[in-house]
Amino acid sequence: MTDETKTDPTHVRCPSGLVVAPTGLKIRQLKLLSDRRSVKSGAVFEEFLRVGAAEIVDRGPYPDSVWDWKRALIGDRFRALIGVRVATHGPSFDFDVRCDVCGEPIKWSLNLLELPVRDYPATTLEAWKSGKPMRLTVGGRAATYRVGTGEEEARMRAGIEKLKDGASTGRRAMQRGPGDDVTDSLFLRLDVEGVEKRDLRDWLDDLDGAELTRITESMDAASGGVETVTMVECQERDCGAKVRVEIPFTAGSYWLPRTTATTTDLGSE
C-alpha cells in the first residue's frame, strides 16, 4: 500500500487489494437510517455501498464479472464503507467514551484515514477464490468455516435471529440461556469433524474457556480488515488514564455527525 493510497480519500485500497473511488452520499440515502428494520438487516449499508462505492478502480482478486457488493469480502466491504463515510462527512469522527478509571466522559476525535488496515493473507484469498473452506483445529478436532462475504454475513445475521426466536431445529433452540450469544456465531459458522450440528452448541459449551480466545485469534489471523480498537486518553485533571475502546461505528453520530445541538433528527443516536 502506498502512502498516497493511505491518505487520499478519493482512492481507497481495501484489504484484498481491491481499490474503489468512494463518493459522498445524498440526503435521500442518509434518510434510510431512520428505518430501524433496514439498519438491523443491513439493507441500509448495502445501499450505501451500491451508491457510494460504485466506482471500482482496481478489482484486485475479484473476477471480471458484474460487480455485486454482496459477494465482496467482509473486510473489503467495511473498508469501503469507511471510505464512503469519509467522502460524505470528512475523515474526522468525534465520539464520547467513559473513562474506566475515574468514570468521567472522554470526548475524542479520530481520523478515520489513519486507522490501520490489515491485508487478507494469500491463503485466505486462495480459499475464497476456489470456493474452499478455511480450516482450523477446535478442541482437538478438525473444523472448517466459510470465508466471510456479504452473503455469508447476511446468512449469519438471519441465523442469529432465528436462534433468538427459537426457530432453529437444534435441540437447544428453545432453551437459550445467558451467554448464548457468545457461541451463536461459532455454532452457525463452524462445521466440526465428528460432531453433529444438533450437538454442536453443547459441544462448544463444554470446551475449555481458553479455547474461545484461541478460535477467535485463529479466525482473526486469517481475515483482513480495519483495526476497530483504539486508545483514548482521559483529559480529566489528576487522571490521564489511557483507555482501550472499541470504535463506536454503530453510533448515530458516525453517519450523522453534528457540530451543534439540534432538534432535527434523521436517525437515532
Image: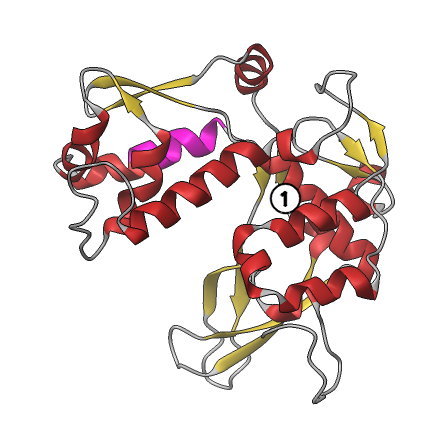
Residue 221 within the magenta-colored segment of the rendering = yes
Bin the neighbour count of mark 1 within 10 Å (Cα to Cα): few under 14, some 14-19, many 20 and up.
some
Residue assigned mark 1: 78
Task: Determine the residue positioned at 59% across, 26% down.
Answer: 120
Q: Position of residue 10 (x, y in %)?
A: 87, 45
Q: Residue furthest left?
A: 206
Horizontally, residue 179 falls left or right of residue 266, namely: left
Towards the viewer: 22 or 175 = 175
Horizontally, residue 173 falls left or right of residue 161, namely: left
Horizontally, residue 8 falls left or right of residue 129, namely: right
Look at the image and tell me whether residue 207 can be seen. yes
Look at the image and tell me whether residue 89 can be seen. no
Q: Which residues are magenta?
A: 214-222
Towards the viewer: 262 or 237 = 262
What residue type is disc 1 on? Phe
Depicted 263 relative to depicted 213: above or below: below
